[in-house]
């Protein structure tokens, strides 16, 4: 029996990247989905021979370049050494596109409250810190850097999926990979399901950490089965999502988990440009008694330096000092670096973006203008509602009705969700981004805001906090106590998502009888309405000898010397058209309207 070999295992063995192996397999016309796909041993040997042969050829070429005969040494006073030197000057690249360099992945850890998130983070912190950082963290800034196998990984120390989604709702997609921690003893719990819904809505890759495998009653395979029921298919269970068995308390498997995270990051090919204009996102912010306003930020691109003038959505400041996650002073911070900033004029909100501007005046003017526009911006905030979902669709986007469904009991939830999902058609989909039992909470509102969804509550009510956040973010909450009312309203909303049918309604005909040339205006067609009516707002086809030669809008419509909105059959008029003046006597103008008709499901 031919054994299977995973691509990433073979890459590690050959000291090659997954991308290099996949490229070779594609050249051999062997289909592979990702780094977690498997190939047979015979194919693996072929790939190994190809890569080994390439390595030998490279060595031979190197020898040929280095080997120089004595005669050529004497005749070659101008060696070709400067050429590679020019290539190795990243500070002044010749190409137009800026250089991109590999950056550390940014990780968020999620999971149920008692499944070991904090224990895992503590273990990673204390075991993966460089030797000179002995003594642990000197201050908490909401993010920190660990080193594994010589590569940096940035961890965001967020309190849970609510904070993760709150940042995404503000447009701050900071996280590259999510580690989902699930207890092998308890399995998937309600908060785990919530976290999965938030991860799916964000579209962020995840790695599953099956924790507490050292405990009696641990059942890792049951966790994998439960995940597959929720649409998360792990390796060995029909999917490619990494699932690593660990014990955060004992430190078992933590290194394997970090290795898997780095592998996922490698496949994403995360890049940053240190030479770009600095920009990033606020992770945490506070008002310190001694330091004043302090903000922890992640630099997403560029290099932030001490003395830079940073502009946030709500405030600005000149960076008086930068500190890393361990409290050490920095002069600059590149892509994916978490830093603490001092010297701000006010306290920004978590999730706000920042950029660097050239002058303080530019920053002050931008903040002043933002305050002037604040009321208008709030009133024009994007709102997901049953009435205007179609208008919120981007051009070319497939219509999809996103819902967050909360019910009083599990039985009602299952019945309602099943009924709603059956309403989906080929033209309009129904996506339940989250379903749950109990009151409508703030986290439900934040998820709905980030996903442009409507909240449907059946025999439940939102708490006061959820109401406030919903009003602030323009999220619609619909409350029902009859299941048929929910179905009817969703059907009506889906019908609104269908593109309307355009129907042409012919209004009348006009015959061109005389042409007038008017300076600075052009040609006016002296005409007679032979049938129906002519509206100033209608569209027109110019027909000559039975052939349509032009189609467009009316520029002006006059009766005698006066502008006219509408003229009836038997009346004379003067007509000019938008973009057409090549009239001839005898032309027929067919006047029509385009009417939109709503479709029903």
Image (tube, grey):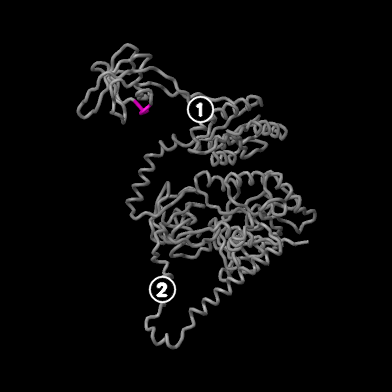
**Most foreground residue, 387 or 600:** 600
| Quarter of the figure that contains the C terminus | top right
**What are the residue bounds of the magenta stretch?**
548-553
Kind of element beneath mark 2? helix
- Callout 1: SS: loop
Residue 428 lies in quadrant? top right
Q: Which quadrant: the N terminus?
A: bottom right
The dot on residue 22 is: none
Residue that carries the numbered disc 2 in the rendered image:
83
Residue drawn at the location 71% of the way across and 44% of the way down: 229
The spot of residue 92 in percent (x, y) is 38, 66
Q: Which of 357 and 24 is in front in this view?
A: 24
Residue drawn at x 58%, y 70% as measured from the top left: 54
Secondary structure mostly taken by the magenta-highlighted segment of the chain: strand
Q: In this view, does 286 lie to the left or right of 207?
A: left
**Residue at horizontal 52 percent and vertical 30 percent from the top:** 499
From the image, tell me which residue sits under label 1. Answer: 500
């Amino acid at each position: 029996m031919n054994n299977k070999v995973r691509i990433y295992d073979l890459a590690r063995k050959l000291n090659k990247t997954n991308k290099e192996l996949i490229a070779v397999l594609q050249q051999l016309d062997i289909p592979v989905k990702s780094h977690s796909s498997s190939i047979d041993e015979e194919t693996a040997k072929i790939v190994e021979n190809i890569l080994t042969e390439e390595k030998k050829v490279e060595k031979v070429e190197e020898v040929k370049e280095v080997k120089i005969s004595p005669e050529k040494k004497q005749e070659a006073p101008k060696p070709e050494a400067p050429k590679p030197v020019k290539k190795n000057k990243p500070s002044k690249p010749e190409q137009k596109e800026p250089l991109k360099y590999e950056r550390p992945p940014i990780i968020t850890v999620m999971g149920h409250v008692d499944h070991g998130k904090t224990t895992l983070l503590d273990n990673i912190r204390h075991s993966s810190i460089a030797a000179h950082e002995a003594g642990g963290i000197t201050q908490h800034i909401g993010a920190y850097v660990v080193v594994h196998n010589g590569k940096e990984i940035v961890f965001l120390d967020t309190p849970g999926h609510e904070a993760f989604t709150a940042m995404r709702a503000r447009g701050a997609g900071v996280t590259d990979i999510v580690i989902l921690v699930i207890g092998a003893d308890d399995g998937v719990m309600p908060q785990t399901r919530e976290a999965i819904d938030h991860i799916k809505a964000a579209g962020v890759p995840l790695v599953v950490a099956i924790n507490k495998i050292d405990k009696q009653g641990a059942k890792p395979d049951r966790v994998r089965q439960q995940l597959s029921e929720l649409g998360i298919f792990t390796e060995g269970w029909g999917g490619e999502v990494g699932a690593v068995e660990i014990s955060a308390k004992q430190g078992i498997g933590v290194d394997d988990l970090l290795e898997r995270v780095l592998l996922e990051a490698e496949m994403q090919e995360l890049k940053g440009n240190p030479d770009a204009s600095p920009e990033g996102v606020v992770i945490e912010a506070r008002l310190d008694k001694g330091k004043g306003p302090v903000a922890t930020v992640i630099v997403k691109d560029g290099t932030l330096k001490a003395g830079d003038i940073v502009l946030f959505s709500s405030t600005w400041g000149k960076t008086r000092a930068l500190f890393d996650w361990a409290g050490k002073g920095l002069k600059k911070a590149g892509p994916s670096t978490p830093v603490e900033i001092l010297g701000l004029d006010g306290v920004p909100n978590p999730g706000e973006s920042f950029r660097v501007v050239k002058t303080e005046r530019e920053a002050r003017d931008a903040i002043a203008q933002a305050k002037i526009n604040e009321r208008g911006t709030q009133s024009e905030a994007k709102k997901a509602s049953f009435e205007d979902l179609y208008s919120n669709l981007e051009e070319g986007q497939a219509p999809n009705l996103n819902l967050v469904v909360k019910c009083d009991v599990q039985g009602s939830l299952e019945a309602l969700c099943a009924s709603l999902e059956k309403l989906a058609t080929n033209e309009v989909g129904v996506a339940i981004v989250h379903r749950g039992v109990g009151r409508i909470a703030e986290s439900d509102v934040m998820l709905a805001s980030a996903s442009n969804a409507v909240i449907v509550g059946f025999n439940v009510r939102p708490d006061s906090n959820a109401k406030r956040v919903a009003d602030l973010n323009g999220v619609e909450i619909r409350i029902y106590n009859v299941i048929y009312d929910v179905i009817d309203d969703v059907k009506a909303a889906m019908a609104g998502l269908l593109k309307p049918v355009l129907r042409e309604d012919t209004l009348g005909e006009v015959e061109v009888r005389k042409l007038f040339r008017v300076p600075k205006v052009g040609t006016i067609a002296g005409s007679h309405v032979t049938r129906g009516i002519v509206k100033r707002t209608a569209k027109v086809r110019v027909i000559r000898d039975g052939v349509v030669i032009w189609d467009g809008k009316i520029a002006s419509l006059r009766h005698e010397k006066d502008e006219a909105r509408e003229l009836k059959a038997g009346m004379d008029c003067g007509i000019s058209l938008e973009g057409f003046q090549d009239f001839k006597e005898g032309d027929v103008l067919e006047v029509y309207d385009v009417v939109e008709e709503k479709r029903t499901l």
